[in-house]
Image (spheres, rainbow, N blue to C red):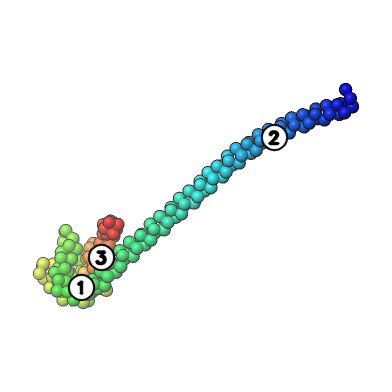
């Protein structure tokens, strides 16, 4: 073998080694790229999943917050309507003495407030504006007692015993307050639909 053949043989051997190394390196690079793509896809999917979870959580929080705001607004509106209705009713009731049915109402309030047993001295507490009406009603029902004009009210009366123990609250204001509380649930139910 000649020198040239030896060099050529060495060059061929070196070229084969280089080719094998290149093929091996290409395989390793391809495997690394494939592995990187898989990891990249998995990472993208994980990031997307987390982003979706975060977005859903934020959306749910926004919906919950909006629902709570709406509930608060509805409650405030319902309460406002309730208060306005009773405020308007109160204005109307302050003028009840001018209504012809007031005499009949006062008469019924007196009957309702009277105690079951007529024992002891009775005091009928009224507003001065109802003095004549109260006397007429007491005469009509043969009620004995003292008229005490010590109230300032829209109408009605209170009854007490001789020891000033109030046994009957029947003023327009006290009836109005009881009605307001008694009707609250029913009115709110109507307002809720």
**Which x, y percent locates residue 86?**
28, 66
Left or right of 127 in this view: 74: right
Q: Secondary structure at mark 3?
A: helix
* Depth check, front residue: 44 or 101: 44
For image coordinates 35% across by 60% down, the residue present is: 74
Q: State the separation of the CA atoms marked 3 and 1.
A: 12 Å
> Is 165 placed above or below 57 here?
below
Determine which quarter of the picture holds residue 11: top right
**Which x, y percent locates residue 176?**
25, 65
For image coordinates 11% across by 67% down, the residue present is: 141
Left or right of 110 in this view: 177: right
Check residue 96 in the rendering and tell me which mark sits there, or answer none: 1
Q: State the separation of the CA atoms marked 3 and 2.
A: 94 Å
Check residue 57 in the rendering and tell me which mark sits there, or answer none: none
Any part of residue 81 in sight: yes
Check residue 176 in the rendering and tell me which mark sits there, or answer none: 3
Indicate which label's residue lies in the foreground, 3 or 2: 2
Any part of residue 165 in sight: no
Tag 1–tag 2 contact (CB < 8 Å): no
For image coordinates 23% across by 72% down, the residue present is: 92
* Depth check, front residue: 53 or 142: 53
Q: Residues within 10 Å of mark 1 (few under 14, many from 20)?
A: some
N-term mark: 3 or 2: 2
Left or right of 174 in this view: 1: right
N-term mark: 3 or 1: 1
Tag 3–tag 2 contact (CB < 8 Å): no
Question: The C terminus is located in which quarter?
Answer: bottom left
């Amino acid at each position: 073998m000649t020198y040239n053949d030896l060099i050529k043989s060495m060059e061929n051997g070196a070229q084969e080694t280089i080719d094998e190394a290149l093929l091996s390196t290409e395989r390793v690079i391809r495997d690394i790229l494939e592995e990187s793509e898989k990891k990249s896809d998995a990472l993208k999917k994980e990031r997307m999943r987390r982003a979706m979870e975060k977005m859903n959580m934020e959306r749910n929080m926004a919906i919950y917050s909006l629902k709570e705001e709406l509930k608060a607004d509805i409650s405030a509106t319902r309460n406002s309507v309730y208060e306005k209705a009773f405020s308007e009713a109160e204005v109307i009731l302050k003028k009840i003495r001018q209504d012809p049915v007031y005499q009949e109402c006062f008469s019924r309030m007196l009957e309702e407030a009277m105690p079951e047993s007529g024992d002891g001295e009775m005091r009928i507490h009224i507003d001065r504006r109802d003095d004549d009406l109260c006397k007429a009603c007491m005469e009509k029902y043969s009620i004995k007692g003292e008229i005490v004009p010590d109230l300032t009210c829209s109408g009605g009366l209170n009854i007490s015993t001789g020891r000033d123990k109030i046994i009957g609250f029947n003023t327009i204001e006290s009836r109005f307050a009881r009605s307001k509380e008694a009707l609250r649930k029913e009115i709110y139910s109507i307002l809720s639909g």
